[in-house]
Amino acid sequence: MVIATLAPDAPGDLMIDIVDVRKRFGATQALRGVTCSFSRGEFVALLGSNGAGKSTLVKILDGVYPADAGTIAVRGGRAGLGVVHQDLGLVDGMTVAENLCLGAPRRLVNPRAEARLTTEALRAVGLTSIDPYALVSTLSLGQRAMVAVAKTLHRGADTVVIDEVTAGLHPHEARWVVERLRVAAEFGATVLMVTHKLDEVVGAATRYVVLSDGEVALDEDAGGIARADLVAMMSRGRSVSAPAPGAGRVDASGGGIVCELKGVHAGGAGPIDLTVTEGRITAITGPLGSGLHEVAYAAAGLLTPDAGTVRVASDVRRACVPAHRESEGVFAEHTVQFNVAVGGWSRWRGRTGLLRVRQMRRDCDDAVAALAVVPHRLDATVSDLSGGNQQKTLFARALMRRPRLLVLCEPTRGVDVATRREIYAQVRRMADSGTGVLMASTDYEDIAALADTTGVLTADGTVSEWLTPDRLPELTTELA
Ligand SMILES: Nc1ncnc2c1ncn2[C@@H]1O[C@H](COP(=O)(O)OP(=O)(O)OP(=O)(O)O)[C@@H](O)[C@H]1O
């Protein structure tokens, strides 16, 4: 199926018409007949739990996959629709104007005309303060996201699909992005935004579409549904009520030292001094590229620091959830069971040296059930899981090792609202049982929910200060 051009007699405001779109991957029916249409100037939040079918729909709209059945018609045809992915597709070392005009057909290189066009394109998304000559690398992540949106619209798209670009942004900056998207919609663009963070879009989205198990479970104007009902739909009935962010925080400052970093330099960060103690969740946060993940890897023993010492208490078992699941985390071609169990074999080895396979299956099954991995099949191949479900298997693996030092890098990346709460509860339980936790996260929600103390890395890779939970609101958009 190719994306068709809307018929000339289609209603004037209609921009995209999706009718009965279906997609199957082997045994999984990812989309079961999705029908919905979007009009000019709408700002639609596309929501749903992990595995609901959002990415599949976006990829079909983007031309990555063909649908098995159904039709999609877009005003202006394929060119009328643009997708902005999480990686944004910008070249950091080029200016905003160069990025906007990169690859666009042009007869003459005319920097002044490029700058003028860029200013207009930025205005169309409510950006008035960005210098067209600024290097993209000097912009905040939120500004970059909006430059990517401006670029898509500048290329002639009237509809822009934004695929989780606000994940990991500080809530202030995410709201800033959403506000600009709202302006773009007011100026006539149609905005479809995929997100797991409902609070980002409340007040800006004009409509909610919730996918569940490959179907449209809800399609409502924003005024027509209560937030609680939306959350319930997004979590497919799983509990999102416990624990509240920050619940269960304890003063465990008297716990024994599990791991100590002194003068550590890693990934451009340093010198870093930090201590992880039993029962306490120590967090570091900062801009991407500040080296925060590499510092965490040094603590986890996955990376030798360029300088400084990492001291770990004797007999401490370490486990780590890495920051980039695709390149550092999952064994994509192996099963869910292998991915959860790997590295924890000793747990199931009996006195005779044989693996207690049935117990291993049971434990893996309990772990994936607690996190509601979809599909709930230990023999599923991990590359066939949605992004959020892959993240859950990584988290389950780390816990399966029963570590005394748990290192978490971006632990909730891409997971749905119910899983996020479950992960928070499980991390807190681990800490309560005496595990020392080191979390490196750019996600403010992770920090606000879990951190007992937070080291804030500046762009030059040093810790500017350590914040207690009551001071976390001081973390501003600098994070991005
Ligand atoms: N390439 C693939 N091969 C096999 N199954 C797939 C493939 N891509 C997706 N699926 C399955 O299709 C279903 C929908 O996945 P999809 O990635 O669209 O979900 P999603 O809503 O985007 O989830 P997430 O919020 O975790 O990103 C899932 O059950 C997933 O396992």
Image (cartoon, grey):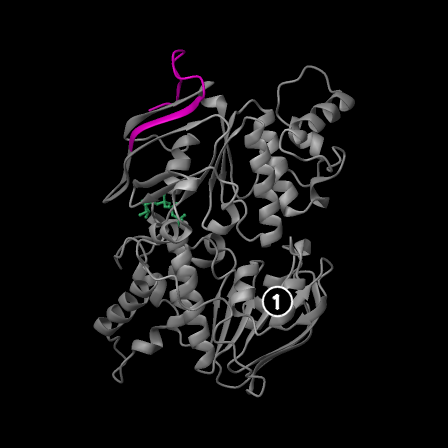
Residue on which disc 1 sits: 284
Question: Which residue appears at 52% of the width and 63% of the height?
Answer: 446
Which range of residues does the magenta coloring cover?
1-21
- Return the residue found at the far left: 358
Displayed-image quarter of ligand 1: top left
**Coordinates of residue 458 in the picture (x, y in percent):** 71, 61
Reply above or below: 187 against 57: above
Crowd around label 1: few <14 · some 14–19 · many ≥20 (10 Å): many
Q: Nearer the viewer, residue 36 or 300?
A: 36
Q: Nearer the viewer, residue 410 or 301?
A: 410
Quarter of the picture containing the N terminus is top left
Q: Nearer the viewer, residue 124 or 306?
A: 124
Q: How many marks?
A: 1
Tell whether position 8 is magenta: yes
Q: Is residue 459 left or right of residue 209?
A: right
**Coordinates of residue 174 in the picture (x, y in percent):** 58, 48
Tell whether position 416 is magenta: no
**Coordinates of residue 144 in the picture (x, y in percent):** 64, 41
Q: Is residue 364 left or right of residue 177?
A: left
Reply above or below: 399 against 420: below
Question: Which residue appears at 45% of the width and 58% of the height?
Answer: 329
* Amino acid carrying mark 1 in the image: Ile
Q: Is residue 266 visible?
A: no
